[in-house]
């Protein structure tokens, strides 16, 4: 396959869904009389447009009546005015086409999420409203060649109410970066992955909050497959994150705040490092299934309506690594291990949990119980350690880095 020259650009203000491909010359070349003959070569000669400004690696858009609409350009014949792409096309005459410029909307470019494959990058320069289920090709990428969506910290709003409709597709071997995701309707989830056992999704700096768009969410993210979340936040959902009984999800530097029930509820294997669970209606973190392996390290659970950390599964054949966490001001226990197993805890901190420090079946190694609040301003989301005697000063003197 030919490597694309760069990202496929979207701009809902200046772009076009009918006269641009998103990758190529800054001013799109367009025509209306392309001939497609069932091969990978498209004849533009009837339009008499010079193809000299087009490069290998640009993207061709053909507004076909069905099937493929996008393909990366593999070669250009400027004499015969034909373009050969990586992929074959159907058979059709008088087709409008474009190379370059910027696309306008994800909704008007749904086919791109079927036609793409590893190495393609979709990038938006503006906010987008998605009224279409754009999940399509479930396996476009490979282990060494992901597909990617870059959002440049723009807001993507889902306006289609459907139980399993996602605001962005999450196929196998995919990356989603720098997005604010919300919904204007009642929706099940904004990041969903339900196919592709064992394959990988990377979600980086993605922030989910249904209330930004005035809607409601059952899950910020729901995964039945493998996902890696880095620097993300999940707020004002029923559950911030929920998992099915297969797959593995890993979270680093993530925030789960003000969700109606659980901050996070992975049903299968899960890893949490440097995460914050705060102000959720029930447990901050619930790991509830049996025979699962969980890593919970350097996390903070504060102000939740249940336990700070509830490792509720039956660890008959499971393993939990649980160390250097802080549980503070939770309505239940700081730490709860309801099922019989050793459940070793190392260097875990508690302060002011209503039901007490820890319950259940555990081995509490080097516990730290504080006599003062350790945080600078937890009520306003500042979980940096203060210098108060009996509080943050105790943790500073231990030389552990907790929750950062």
Image (spheres, rainbow, N blue to C red):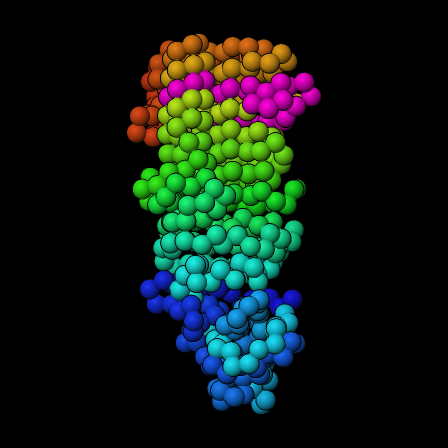
Q: Picture coordinates of residue 274 (x, y %)?
A: 48, 31
Q: Picture coordinates of residue 293 (x, y %)?
A: 63, 27
Q: Is residue 290 magenta?
A: yes
In the depicted view, which residue is nearer to us: 285 or 324?
Answer: 285
Q: Quadrant of residue 389?
A: top left
Magenta-drawn stretch, dominant element (helix, strand or loop): loop
Asked if residue 264 can be seen in this view, the reply is: yes
In the rendered image, the quadrant that contains the C terminus is top left
Asked if residue 392 can be seen in this view, the reply is: no
> In this rendering, is residue 36 above or below 124?
below
Q: Picture coordinates of residue 31 (x, y %)?
A: 47, 81
In the depicted view, which residue is nearer to us: 315 or 320?
Answer: 315
Q: Residue at x 69, y 21 (%)?
A: 317
Q: Is residue 107 magenta?
A: no
Q: Quadrant of residue 304?
A: top left
Q: How many marks?
A: 0
In the depicted view, which residue is nearer to us: 311 or 157?
Answer: 157
Q: In this image, 79 relative to 96: left or right? A: right
Q: Residue at x 63, y 22 (%)?
A: 290
Question: What stretch of residues is rendered in magenta?
Answer: 288-317
In the depicted view, which residue is nearer to us: 92 or 299?
Answer: 92
In the rendered image, the quadrant that contains the N terminus is bottom right
Q: Residue furthest right?
A: 317
Q: Residue at x 39, y 59 (%)?
A: 125
Q: Residue at x 49, y 76 (%)?
A: 97
Q: Picture coordinates of residue 5 (x, y %)?
A: 54, 68
> In this rendering, is residue 307 above or below 7?
above
Q: In this image, 270 relative to 385: left or right? A: right
């Amino acid at each position: 396959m030919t490597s694309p020259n760069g990202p496929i650009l979207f701009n809902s203000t200046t772009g076009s869904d009918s006269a641009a491909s998103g990758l190529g010359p800054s001013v799109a070349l367009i025509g209306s009389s392309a001939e497609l003959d069932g091969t990978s070569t498209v004849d533009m000669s009837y339009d008499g447009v010079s193809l000299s400004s087009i490069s290998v690696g640009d993207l061709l858009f053909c507004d076909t009546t069905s099937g493929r609409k996008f393909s990366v350009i593999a070669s250009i014949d400027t004499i015969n005015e034909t373009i050969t792409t990586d992929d074959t096309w159907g058979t059709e005459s008088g087709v409008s086409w474009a190379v370059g410029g910027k696309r306008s909307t994800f909704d008007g470019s749904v086919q791109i999420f079927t036609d793409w494959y590893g190495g393609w990058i979709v990038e938006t320069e503006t906010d987008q409203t998605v009224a279409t289920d754009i999940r399509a090709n479930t396996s476009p990428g490979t282990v060494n060649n992901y597909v990617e969506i870059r959002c440049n910290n723009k807001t993507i709003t889902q306006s289609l109410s459907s139980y399993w409709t996602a605001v962005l597709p999450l196929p196998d071997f995919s990356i989603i970066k720098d997005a604010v995701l919300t919904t204007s309707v009642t929706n099940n989830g904004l990041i969903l992955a339900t196919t592709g056992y064992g394959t990988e999704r990377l979600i980086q700096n993605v922030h989910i909050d249904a209330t930004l768009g005035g809607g409601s969410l059952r899950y910020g993210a729901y995964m039945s497959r493998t996902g890696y979340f880095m620097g993300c936040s999940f707020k004002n959902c029923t559950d911030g994150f929920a998992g099915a009984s297969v797959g593995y999800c890993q979270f680093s530097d993530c925030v789960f705040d003000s969700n109606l029930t659980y901050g996070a509820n992975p049903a299968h294997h899960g890893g949490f490092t440097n995460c914050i669970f705060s102000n959720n209606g029930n447990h901050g973190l619930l790991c509830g299934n049996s025979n699962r392996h969980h890593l919970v390290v350097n996390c903070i659970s504060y102000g939740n309506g249940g336990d700070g950390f509830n490792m509720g599964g039956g660890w008959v054949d499971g393993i939990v690594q649980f160390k250097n966490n802080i549980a503070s001001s939770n309505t239940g226990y700081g730490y709860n291990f309801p099922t019989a197993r050793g459940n070793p805890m190392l260097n875990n901190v508690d302060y002011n949990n209503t039901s007490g420090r820890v319950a259940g079946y555990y081995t509490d190694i080097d516990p730290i119980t504080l006599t003062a609040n350790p945080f600078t301003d937890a009520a306003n989301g500042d979980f940096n350690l203060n210098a108060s005697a009996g509080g943050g000063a105790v943790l500073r003197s231990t030389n552990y880095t907790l929750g950062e």
